[in-house]
Image (cartoon, rainbow, N blue to C red):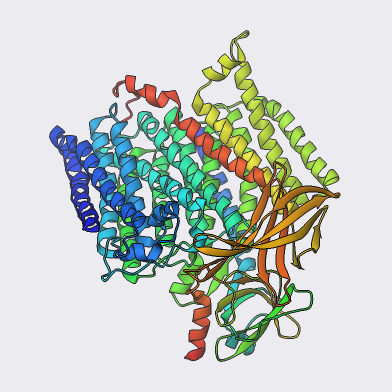
Amino acid sequence: MKPRHKRLALVVAGVAGLGLGAWLVLAAFQQNLVFFFTPTQVAAGEAPHGRSFRIGGMVESGSLRREGDGIAVSFTVTDTARSVPVRYRGALPDLFKEGKGVVAQGRLGADGAFIADEVLAKHDENYMPPDAAYAVKQAQK
Amino acid sequence: MIPELGNFALILALGLALVQGTLPLVGAWRGDARLMAVARPVALGQALFVTVGFGVLVYAFVTNDFSVSYVAGNSNSRLPVQYRVCSVWGGHEGSVLLWIQILALWTVAVAAFSRSLPRELVARVIAVMGLVSVGFLCFLLFTSNPFARSLPAALDGRDLNPLLQDLGMIAHPPILYMGYVGFSVAFAFAIAALLGGRLDAAWARWTRPWTLLAWSFLTLGIFLGSAWAYYELGWGGWWFWDAVENASFMPWLVGTALIHSLSVTEKRDSFRNWTVLLAILAFSLSLLGTFLVRSGVLTSVHAFASDPTRGLYILGFLAVVIGGALALYAWRAPSVGLGGRFALFSRESLLLLNNVVLAAAAGTVLLGTLYPLALDALGLGKISVGPPYFDAVFVPLSIPLVLLTAVGPMLAWKQASARDVLRRLRPVVLGALAFALLALVALRASAATAVGIGAAAWLLIGTALEAAKRLRAHAAGTRWSRRIAATPLGWWGMIAAHAGLAVFVLGVTVVKSFETSADASLRIGESVALGDFRFAFEALERVEGPNYIAARGRFEVTRDGKVVATLHPEKRFYVVQKMPMTEAAVDRGALRDLYVSLSEATADGAWVVRVQHKPLMGWIWAGALLIAAGGAIAAADRRYRAAKRVPASVAIPVSIPLPN
């Protein structure tokens, strides 16, 4: 091969590699972006069915219940205007508390409750997850 | 009075840093030896005053001087003394001071070990590091002074975040910063080369050990952070694709590309402008990481205050450093050129491929990390990009990378023989296929798992064969110890790091594929089964620590009726911060980790417990440590020190024509 051809082959290989990378990224992006919805938006039916998303707000006081097996929990997430019932199985994070901010990821169940696979509270007692704070602020506008 | 001395020392350090950042540059430009000679003593002086400032802050923490508001905000008189010392970097202000302190250490090291280098180069390198120091010292003094007083003094401090009260806090931040800041040396060398118009194999040989050392520290720092999250966050995860982790992972990826690209520049005098660009990018991403983590843009245990002036300052600083460096690069790089030529099938080509893949990987991580921030800042909605995205993008990129890692060292420089390489690859392919099949049949693994195990076997076998070939190549009859000692450390470092990568990939694949976990609600005396293991909740006692109270459980883990481990997970309550903490218990083994965490007590006296079995978990850590060790071993290669005896004029003089 002449040097010119070699260089061309290298450039083609490089472009092909970058193209593959870009394609992977865009495909993965399409499938895996997780959108955020406030309880008001969920109540208004704006949240998608059959796709994972996040909700955030405060855990409504007095709403936390453990089911008989001790593992399933249910609670209500509110942005002070509307609220959404949430069900979850498993251990809750240390800073999960009634009346405090929370963000949950999961999908809507058939009965309109939010089935969470993941519940996030944050690392500091006085700290409000920004998504939860945003939900409450939106609702109070 | 003493905190004011610390403040004063930092102001003096700023003054010296200004001198260090300007006079030697002017000297190098004009060829004025006296001005260039200023660099070393001024750099030492700056480092001395920074160290005094740092020492004063440590003193304020150790003596519980709560009139200093930073101390009052991050410490407490009941905090054990070792945690009081590391509370210095438990908050925003002290972290920035730690950054500056470590930059001072690297600068002193460069000043001390650069006697054999051309004085213009040394002057420029030290000056660029001085300018970086100016930027950070201004940031510290004008927006985040750690010595600010709040009088009257608080009676006691607000304590360190309980998550940070751990041995990991002593080691992880300083080591990680050693890596981040260490890339400033490669950056300074790159800028100096662009300014001076001299970029050749000798330059690459001077830059390499510094870059290898910084990369090794960064690897170790990321490892420490990950290992710490594994047991301290309480839920057994070790990598979350959290933006903070990505912030340290991006410079690591680009740094990995850089150490490979540097080897080409040193050995073949090729990839010149690409190497310089990578050096600039690696440090830029380190700065971006500092910005992401420290500005409060990201919310996590790492983000402290969200003060908008700080964010603006760092953003401006980033723009100046990255923009300035890239502008200089755009101006001077065309004259640097790519350097030596090579055939399509050669080690150079494979290293180029390595660089492309690593850069692409860093780009995808950057996109996934910044895209949600950008959308949020523009008010276009709130989204998050979680582990599924990164897994989907990263795994397809890393499998070919792992395969090529074994092939690269087999290829000759400049022009390799395909037939020879194919012959040497035959046992590697067979071995990898055998392991993949074994995984499919014996472990009933999924196809993806088999690919992961096969790739790890491929790399491990390929690296072992490469090592065997190199050792056999010595004259017959040479003793093995002699053969090992006669092989350069740089090469051994590569072997260690590549083997480490294989061990790491194997660990990750097996943990991801075969880990099991169960949540159960247990009363004392009850037990839960997980695979072959049975976790019995035997007892619960109350424990009092220096600044917390805890419920401490005792779990007996049995397998086929035999006790294999006794674990003591705790649920702590830190009284000052009124914060609960899960302190998980882990039984580590060569082949598996057993993991128990206490979640919460329910109303009827039962505890929600999570038990986990993680096969080959320790291999992830062993692999990461081996990779870090590889970098350190390679940095210790004798030829970087032996270079002293070679006068600069003997080194291949490939000078760059200066633009008019």
Q: Residue B412: x, y in percent?
A: 56, 26
Q: Residue B195: x, y in percent?
A: 26, 41
**Left or right: B485 in relation to B552:** left
**Which residue shows up at 25% across the image and 63% down it?**
B142
Q: Residue B170: x, y in percent?
A: 46, 50
**Which residue shows up at 78% across the image and 50% down it?**
B447
Residue B522 occupies which quadrant of the picture? Answer: bottom right
Q: Is residue B53 visible?
A: yes
The foreground one among A107 and B653 is A107
**Left or right: B41 in relation to A1:** left
**Which residue shows up at 70% across the image and 83% down it?**
A113
Query: In the rendered image of this protein, does residue B373 appear above or below residue B534?
Result: below
Q: Is residue B327 visible?
A: no
Query: In the rendered image of this protein, does residue B553 appear above or below residue B503?
Result: below
Q: Residue A81: x, y in percent?
A: 56, 91
The foreground one among B122 and B244 is B244
Image quadrant holding the C terminus of chain B, namely top left
The foreground one among B153 and B659 is B153
**Left or right: B566 in relation to B58:** right
Which residue appears farthest toward the top when viewing the image?
B477
**Left or right: B434 in relation to A32:** right
